[in-house]
């Protein structure tokens, strides 16, 4: 699988860049609260620290859960590891926010059709405009 090129071993949140870990924790919170039909914005803003980033991340997660070929897999909130889907998400956000579209497409082209790639890139890149969490 292509992701194994990027993940030689099981990633752990304490060993990650702070921004990546916060995006993973925000994604877990978002998925759990949305599944429970609750508004995740207040909870994820604690991880993201800015209302504008929270709004853009909420829009990104709406897209991700619609275009992902299978249900977006998250680990439990207390888990120190990261799922493949969570790692793909933070890798894609990072690539989109430094405008490296070719690497973004390489990462996801086996999994997503072109129109989904375009939408995902646009939503992930929008985080940069509102203050993407810097590493």
Image (cartoon, rainbow, N blue to C red):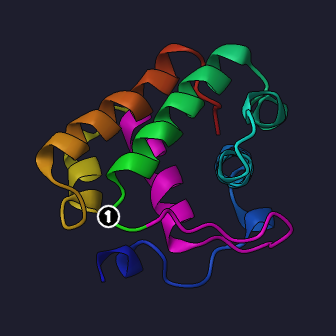
Residue 99 falls in image quadrant: top left
Give the percent coordinates (x, y) of residue 108: 27, 59
Mark 1 Cα within 10 Å, few/some/many (few <14, many 20+)?
A: few
The residue sitting at 49% across, 83% down in the picture is 8
* Vertical relation: 67 (above or below) 53: below
On screen, residue 100 versus residue 50, left or right, reads left
Q: Which residues make up the magenta segment?
A: 71-97
Give the percent coordinates (x, y) of residue 105: 21, 51
* Vertical relation: 52 (above or below) 76: above
User: Dot 1 lies on which element?
Assistant: loop
Name the residue that disc number 1 marks: 69
Instruction: State which quarter of the image contains the C terminus.
Output: top right
Residues 35 and 119: in front is 35
On screen, residue 22 versus residue 85, left or right, reads right
**Residue 76 magenta:** yes
The residue sitting at 40% across, 30% down in the picture is 123
* Vertical relation: 15 (above or below) 127: below
On screen, residue 1 versus residue 115, left or right, reads right
Residue 115 falls in image quadrant: top left
- Residue at the extreme left: 114
Residue 19 falls in image quadrant: top right
């Amino acid at each position: 699988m292509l992701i194994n090129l990027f993940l030689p071993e099981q990633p752990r949140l304490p060993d990650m860049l702070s921004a990546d870990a916060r995006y993973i924790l925000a994604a877990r919170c978002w998925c759990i609260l949305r599944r429970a039909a609750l508004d995740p914005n207040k909870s994820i803003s604690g991880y993201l620290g800015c209302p504008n980033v929270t709004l853009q991340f909420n829009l990104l997660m709406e897209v991700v859960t619609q275009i992902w070929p299978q249900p977006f897999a998250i680990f439990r909130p207390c888990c120190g590891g990261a799922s493949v889907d969570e790692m793909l998400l933070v890798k894609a956000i990072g690539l989109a926010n430094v405008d490296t579209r070719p690497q973004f497409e390489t990462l996801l082209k086996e999994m997503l059709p072109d129109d989904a790639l375009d939408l995902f890139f646009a939503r992930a890149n929008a985080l940069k405009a509102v203050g993407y969490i810097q590493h």
